[in-house]
Amino acid sequence: MFSVVFNQNPEFTHTVILVMAAFTMILGVLGAVASYNYKSILAYHCISQYGYIMMGFSIFSPLAIAGAIYFIAHHSIVKTALFQFAGVTERITGTSDLKKMGGVLSSHPWLAWLFFITAMSLAGIPPLTGFFAKYPLVLDGLDQGHYIIVGIALFVGLLTLYSMVKIMMYVYWGKEKHTSEQRKIKVGSLLYPIIPLVMLTVVFGFAAEPVMQVSMTIAEEILEPSNYINTVLGE
């Protein structure tokens, strides 16, 4: 769509979408900062993270689009894991209200530390996928002179980190608020689908270079729409 439909007047269309990306990032993360519901925070972050993807396509250079493609893969992995963490934690505590939760680290340490790794990836802490997904967007944004959107992206990253730390402090650290019966709930089998996702965000982080090479190949094909047009319409 971007390379075929939105390629007629990119100075106008891409600027509009870049502004939309900025508002998407800001409004989404502000919702996450203000909320004290576990699932709502993650849902607001979905909005915010889509702003980064819009940013990459709006800059419309090979590196920025490659970063957006990398970001799509990163977000799919990390956010899927985080929503599963929310479900498992609710199974233990019986609530999604952060203010009614606490002390899960002492009763279910594996759950807490796996969440911490995934949360840091969402916030963009190296060497996890979140850092390498945002890095090309920031780098190419500076090269292209989009200083305002880069500043917003970095600020939103800090607020993302804050909201993830907020979940960690309210839910996993502190004094236990769940009952002794809830403490005994076994969640080992519920972690089976989560562990591969956490491993992926670590592996893709350390293997960022080959993943970015694939993303760059895709980006270069997106920026050359003639292959698609010729395939559909014929030579």
Image (tube, rainbow, N blue to C red):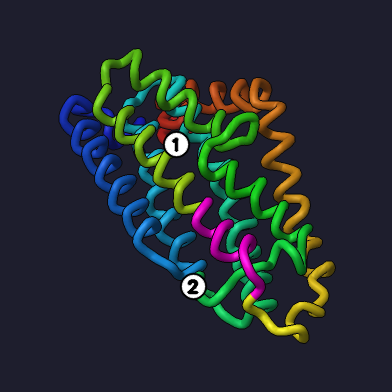
Asked if residue 53 can be seen in this view, the reply is no
The Cα atoms of the two marked residues, 2 and 1, are separated by 55 Å
Q: Which residue is mark 2?
A: 99
Quadrant that contains the N terminus: top left
Q: Is 135 included in the stretch rendered in magenta?
A: no
Q: Going 57% across and 73% down the picture, which residue do you hit?
A: 101
| Crowding at mark 2 (Cα within 10 Å: few <14, some 14-19, many 20+) | some
Q: Quadrant of residue 5?
A: top left
Q: Is residue 57 left or right of residue 66?
A: left
Numbered range of the magenta stretch: 165-176
Secondary structure of residue under mark 1: helix
Asked if residue 32 can be seen in this view, the reply is yes
Q: Going 33% across and 45% down the picture, which residue do you hit?
A: 25
Where residue 98 appears, as percent x and y from the top left, is: 51, 70
Where residue 45 appears, as percent x and y from the top left, is: 43, 54
Where residue 155 appears, as percent x and y from the top left, is: 35, 37
Q: Is 170 included in the stretch rendered in magenta?
A: yes
Q: Which residue is mark 1?
A: 232
Q: Quadrant of residue 234?
A: top left
Q: Quadrant of residue 44?
A: bottom left
**Which amino acid type is shown beneath numbered disc 2?**
Lys
Where residue 53 appears, as percent x and y from the top left, is: 41, 39
Indicate whether 235 appears above or below 29.
above
Instruction: Give 69 or 30, whichever is nearer the viewer.
Output: 30
